[in-house]
Amino acid sequence: MQELTHYIGGEHVKGTSGRFADVYNPATGEVQAKVPLANAEEMAGAVAIAAEAQVAWAATNPQRRARVLMAFVGLLNRDMEKLAEALSREHGKTIPDAKGDVQRGLEVVEYCIGAPELLKGDYTDAAGPGIDMYSMRQALGVTAGITPFNFPAMIPMWMFAPAIACGNAFILKPSERDPSVPLMLAELLEEAGLPKGILQVVNGDKEAVDAILHDEIIQSVGFVGSTPIAEYIYATGCANGKRVQCFGGAKNHMIIMPDADMEQAADALVGAGYGAAGERCMAISVAVPVGEDTADRLIEALVPKIEKLKVGPYTAGNDVDYGPVVTSAAKANIERLVQTGIDQGAKLVVDGRNFNLQGYEDGFFVGPHLFDNVTPEMDIYKYEIFGPVLSTVRAGSYEEALKLAMDHEYGNGTAIFTRDGDAARDFASRVNVGMIGINVPIPVPLAYHTFGGWKKSVFGDLNQHGPDAFKFYTRTKTVTARWPSGIKQGGEFNFKPMD
Ligand code: NAD
């Protein structure tokens, strides 16, 4: 049984708390490693190393810091296959999807190579008589991030790339479900030239998180995960005077207008609803066809596509559409919610229950489910299922569809499928959701824009990556300067022969 480590001060360090969590291979259901769960003392040790290393790193010019990230991009590309394999083995997603996970993180690293430009301050010449004023953005110091299981490469990179580009040290507390890729990323960054102690990985659970939240040296906390934990971390971190940004759960609606290209909409829904077994915060989990005829046509187009989906282990190659869910507990929770859907009167059009994969009977596989006639009172509508379950809510009109998306407590992403530019424009303008797709089902903004939802999908103000990240990971300092008259009045300016 492999015993994983922390990565502290540039070394793989064994856990000393005596507590461990099991890391599964979700495809087989086997425990493949043990990950140490840090206590407050281990966290404090890492923070002390980070605080010492950070001073010199912040004083390193931003172009040199950017060069480390440039080399890191090269190493990520070099090791793409290895990273994707390790990621799929612990998470369960397919290899192409795992590469996408690394790639969308890598793109944020590429953006952060622009740090010298992004960190340039503002300058006002002659703000008053003989007075100049300038603002600079300085690193916070030691920063920390707590990340979810579903993107073990991308989300850590979304946090630590801008943090270290800005001159901070960063402590990553990754998900205890799939900690191997974060450890590999830390090693690669050091190979790229990052000084020891600037990026450390401290594995753990609530105990390690609480140690971060109560640590007096850590200046900021980034969190991505479920909404109840996001709320807790935001409240506790803020109460302890930290800068905090937390991104929570989602229930993303896709509106299908009567004029939509139904084949295109159905294909989009299948990819966005079932890809990665529905374990994406930008997955579409609610389809909202407008009008009975649209709904009937949509269901008719969806069913054969869903029935054709291939569910299997990542080792089965490119034929597999999605893999297992992350744990047996996640599987049990999905099955429980599906049962509430049936009990509360939704129509189960595609029944993924009792899905069985020969040779992988102990894996955490869940067959695809499609519900029709779902109503807003049902649990399958209210709660994030985070599994391969798509709910259809039939709306009588565009306004009714819009209201559904607006009244839901989550506001991460949403999409509209239509050929009507006016409807699309109205939707994008009025809906109270952070990321909108127009004939695009998973509108994840690229690295140079910012990522963030609204409502209960976010706690804090600034978004992730893009220019917001450079604001989150720096403080503004503004200098007003006036100089007394210098030597220009008493000085000698004539070129004189030597005496
Ligand atoms: P989670 O909330 O269970 O765990 C996230 C992190 O919090 C992990 O590092 C975990 O160790 C830690 N944690 C868990 N319980 C804790 C507790 N009681 N106290 C302190 N820390 C705790 O989330 P998950 O299951 O890993 O990820 C799935 C969730 O993340 C979904 O809700 C999904 O929508 C959300 N998510 C959101 C975004 C976004 O950008 N909004 C992106 C990806 C995932």
Image (cartoon, helix red, strand yellow):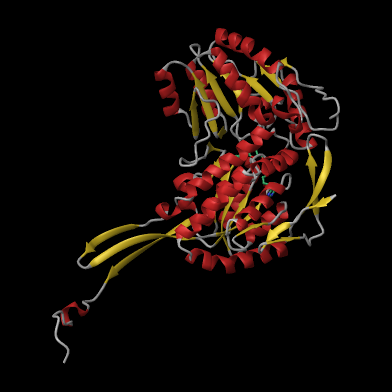
Quadrant where ligand 1 appears: top right
Pinpoint residue 314: horizontal percent, then vertical percent: 74, 32
Pinpoint residue 451: horizontal percent, then vertical percent: 51, 40
Can I make out residue 223 in this image?
A: no
Above or below — where is 90 with respect to 114? Answer: above
Identify the residue at image location x=42%, y=28%: 429
- Observer-nearest of 62 and 67: 67
Pinpoint residue 373: horizontal percent, then vertical percent: 65, 15
Identify the residue at image location x=30%, y=59%: 123
Above or below — where is 374 with respect to 114? Answer: above
Pinpoint residue 26: horizontal percent, then vertical percent: 78, 36
Q: Number of labelled discs?
A: 0
- Observer-nearest of 171 and 413: 171
Compared across the picture, whether 356 is left or right of 466 comes to right
Compared across the picture, whether 156 is left or right of 138 comes to right
Compared across the picture, whether 392 is left or right of 130 comes to right
Hey, which residue is sitting farthest bottom in the picture? 499
Hey, which residue is sitting farthest top in the picture? 293
Compared across the picture, whether 362 is left or right of 235 comes to right
